[in-house]
Image (spheres, helix red, strand yellow):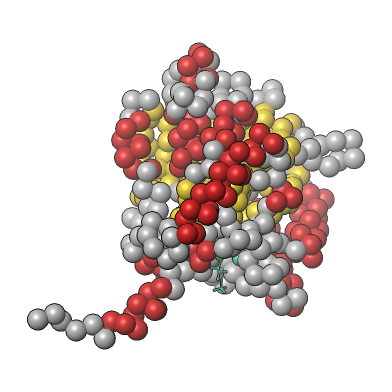
């Protein structure tokens, strides 16, 4: 999965059709040339999401270039159409082989295909890297969420988590259940630490990966939120699809929302509601399920990838309702903490320009 905000319709709302068409055209061409095996293009709000299956391994130059060139072409089209914030996430100009650190978000896993390999991908809008810490912990470490941790003998070994310190650019691997408390001590600080990978402990089988780049740290200022993506493998000795979705029965709070400066309740939605509106939110998340077979997203007889829109389900209506109730509670507080992020988190937002102007007017108190 490689994603990018290339510009959107009506503020930071959705990716409009002409940009989808460019992505579809380029990825179709890449299939014809044998660069990728197949793909699915979708949006999380104003973020264009390229889900690609290929056999070139992680961080492959050709794949990253395909994504980069596609985002560039979309951004040019967005400029021509005078869409909003055209090329928003394209923070660097010269492509040198990898989109990491250039603005787009990336989650990649290299797998040996199992007899049947169900995969769930998540994409969120108006929120930041670190927003998947909570569900990833619930899915792979919390036996109160994932019955398999108790019931499936293949999962009793536990899981290993790679955590990135986004400020110091360092990583650490912690194993659960043994180091569960240490893991929580880190990943509860969602603004700084982000789970990037999860492996099954017994055989190091890769189970999950998420994008952890922080746009504000790349750009040195606020340029829109990271809007992260995550890939999780399911079933047969791994958490079931239903266990992967269970953390989303309830809404939880994430950083982002209006101007990337607020706590907001995440709202699990189907693709038709993958668009942010009120107060530029609330932050949305979509979950798509599919099977990988013979190096492809399993497709129907017409060659169309078969995709399950997992949050398009009344089972998540309660979470959506909770999200709106909590959204109202927070918005009643206006610009007072904890509705607004802490001053440390506001460091990379435009509020610094506002506060900077006041600096000289402060006088020492005698
Ligand atoms: C959040 C986001 C929006 C904008 C807001 C102001 O990630 O993108 O909430 O921050 O709409 O946008 P500008 O400054 O472009 O008018
Ligand atoms: Mg945007
Ligand atoms: Mg976005």
Q: Is residue 40 left or right of residue 301?
A: left
Q: Residue at x 53, y 54 (%)?
A: 328
Quadrant into which the C terminus falls: bottom left
Can you see residue 22? no
Can you see residue 19? yes
Q: Residue at x 47, y 32 (%)?
A: 138
Q: Residue at x 47, y 55 (%)?
A: 330
Q: Is residue 328 left or right of residue 304?
A: left
Residue 268 screen position, x and y as percent: 61, 44
Q: Residue at x 49, y 59 (%)?
A: 331
Comparing 41 with 277, the one in front is 277
Is residue 82 placed above or below 175 in the rendered structure?
below
Is residue 210 placed above or below 198 in the rendered structure?
below
Residue 320: quarter of image: top right
Q: Is residue 163 left or right of residue 11?
A: left
Residue 192 screen position, x and y as percent: 37, 52
Residue 255 screen position, x and y as percent: 46, 55
Toward the bottom, the furthest residue is: 361
């Amino acid at each position: 999965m490689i994603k990018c905000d290339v510009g959107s319709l009506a503020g930071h709302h959705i990716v409009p059709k002409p940009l989808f068409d460019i992505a579809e055209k380029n990825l179709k061409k890449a299939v014809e040339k044998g660069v990728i095996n197949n793909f699915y293009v979708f949006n999380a709000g104003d973020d264009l999401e390229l889900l690609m299956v290929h056999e070139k391994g992680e961080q492959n130059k050709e794949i990253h270039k395909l994504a980069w060139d596609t985002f560039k072409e979309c951004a040019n089209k967005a400029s021509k159409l005078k869409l909003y914030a055209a090329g928003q996430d394209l923070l660097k100009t010269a492509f040198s082989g990898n989109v990491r650190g250039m603005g787009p978000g990336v989650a990649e896993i290299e797998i040996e295909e199992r007899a049947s390999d169900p995969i769930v991908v998540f994409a969120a809008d108006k929120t930041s890297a670190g927003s998947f810490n909570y569900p990833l912990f619930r899915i792979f470490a919390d036996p109160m969420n994932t019955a398999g941790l108790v019931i499936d003998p293949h999962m009793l070994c536990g899981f290993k988590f790679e955590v990135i310190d986004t400020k110091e650019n360092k990583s650490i691997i912690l194993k659960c259940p043994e180091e569960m408390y240490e893991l929580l001590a880190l990943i509860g600080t969602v603004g700084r630490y982000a789970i990037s990978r999860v492996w099954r402990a017994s055989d190091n089988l890769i189970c999950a990966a998420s994008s952890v780049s922080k746009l504000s740290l790349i750009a040195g200022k606020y340029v829109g939120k990271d809007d992260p993506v995550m890939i999780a493998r399911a079933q047969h000795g791994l958490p079931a699809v239903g266990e992967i979705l269970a953390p989303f029965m309830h809404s939880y709070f994430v950083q982002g929302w209006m101007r990337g400066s607020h706590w907001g309740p995440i709202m699990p939605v189907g693709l038709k509601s993958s668009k942010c509106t009120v107060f530029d939110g609330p932050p949305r998340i979509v979950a798509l399920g599919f099977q990988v077979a013979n190096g492809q997203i399993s497709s129907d007889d017409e060659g169309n990838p078969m995709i399950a829109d997992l949050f398009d389900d009344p089972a998540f209506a309660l979470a959506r309702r909770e999200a709106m109730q909590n959204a109202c509670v927070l918005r009643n507080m206006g610009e007072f903490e904890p509705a607004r992020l802490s001053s440390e988190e506001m460091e990379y937002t435009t509020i610094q320009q506002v506060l900077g102007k006041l600096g000289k007017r402060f006088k020492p108190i005698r």
